[in-house]
Amino acid sequence: MQLDPTEIRRILVIKLRAIGDVLLSTIVTKNLRTFFPAAKIDFLTERASRGVLAGNKYVDEIIVFEPSPLNSLRILSEIRRRNYELVIDLFGNPRSAVMTVASGAAHRVGYAFRLRKFAYNIVVQPRGDSVHNTEFNLDALRAIGIQISDRNIHFPLSLQADNFATQFLQSYRLDDKILVALNVGGGWYTKRWRLEQYAALGNRLVEELAASVILLWGPGEYQYVEKLRSLMKHDVIVPPRTDLKQLGALLKKCTFLVTNDSAPMHIAAAVGTPVVGIFGPTSPKLQGPYGDHHAVVRNERLDCLECNLMKCPIGNICMTELDVDEVMMGVEKVLVKIRHGNLSHLRV
């Protein structure tokens, strides 16, 4: 189906959560703006993901949804009042499907998930089990005839965030040292490499690369960072609490990031920092770091990878039995890409 851009004046994109998924969905924003240059483009998401979209010049307004019965009624009324002609539901759960129907939009785009597909009059066959999440999002645009001209995810950094990162790191007098970030968090415990393994890796990064190590953390994760610091033989850098933009600014100044499958992994990729991604229950083909300068490490000896289980019945062996040497091999692959790629701004 080909929409006429002159007939669309108001557009709503819905992607409620999670932070990494919302970031990957920003690949649609410039493409929408290019095809609908005169339209007002709003983006509906939950509060935790608002910082992902802040400063995105292709989005006119960020609408924040607070998940409660009262706020659900309020947001349904607000969506209806705004008279959108086009709603694109990139989230595809029952709540976002109801929001799409409630909009009354003439063009309602969404995916063919169970009964939810009846909320849409432009139905997209989901390929989430076979293509990267960015392509899954772009399929919604292809369904309305948009030629994809931009394949970037968008995470603009603020001057305030850049100043924060610069001033914080200057106090450590890093000079020309390699700066490596470690991110031990992750939404599911099954996605997290053990702290003891991270500590051994951090020690090797200091001893073999003469690197400085910075330990990243988010809400509810400071205890893990303190435990990791206590396990390491060398001093490490621990930043104060950061918002998403400050986290992105810190990551942009790092040589590379070693991380579990998590939001910081996607933020690092968005700001151009190479990633060594540690994977087990999730698929790097579908949810891996976006771009060419990354490496993925998995316990390839197992046949239960990509199980998508949030609880493991066999001891989470994809993580517990993944050796530090294997992750160091991923580090070496990323260093080669840095040295031979267009990444001369990074310290190696």
Image (tube, grey):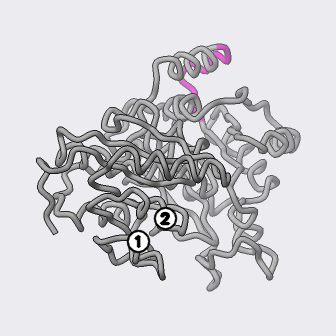
Q: Amino acid at mark 2?
A: Val
Quarter that holds the N terminus = bottom left
The vertical placement of 148 against 155, above or below, is: below
The vertical placement of 134 against 340, above or below, is: below
Which residue is nearer to you in this view: 169 or 306? 306
Question: Which residue is painted at 53% across and 36% down in the image?
Answer: 51
Side of 317 where 289 appears, left or right: left
User: Sequence-wise, which precedes: disc 1 or disc 2?
Assistant: 2
Q: Amino acid at mark 1?
A: Ala
Q: Position of residue 84 (x, y in %)?
A: 31, 50
Side of 98 where 321 appears, left or right: right
Dot 2 crowding, Cα within 10 Å, few <14, some 14–19, many 20+: some
Q: Which residues are magenta?
A: 171-179
Which residue is nearer to you in this view: 46 or 7? 7
Side of 342 where 242 appears, left or right: right
Give the residue number, with chain letter if any, for mark 2: 98
Q: Position of residue 107 (x, y in %)?
A: 27, 62
Side of 241 where 256 appears, left or right: left
Q: Which secondary structure, mark 2?
A: helix
Is residue 35 rendered magenta in the image?
no
Question: Which residue is painted at 55% across and 54% down in the image?
Answer: 17
Question: Which residue is painted at 52% across and 67% down in the image?
Answer: 93
Give the residue number, with chain letter if any, for mark 1: 119
Q: Given the current orientation, which residue lies at the most extreme bottom position?
A: 303
Is residue 173 rendered magenta in the image?
yes
Which residue is nearer to you in this view: 58 or 131? 58
Cα distance in 3D space between marks 1 and 2: 7 Å
User: Of helix, strand and loop, which mostly describes the magenta segment?
Assistant: loop
Whether residues under marks 1 and 2 lie with C-beta atoms below 8 angstroms apart, the answer is yes
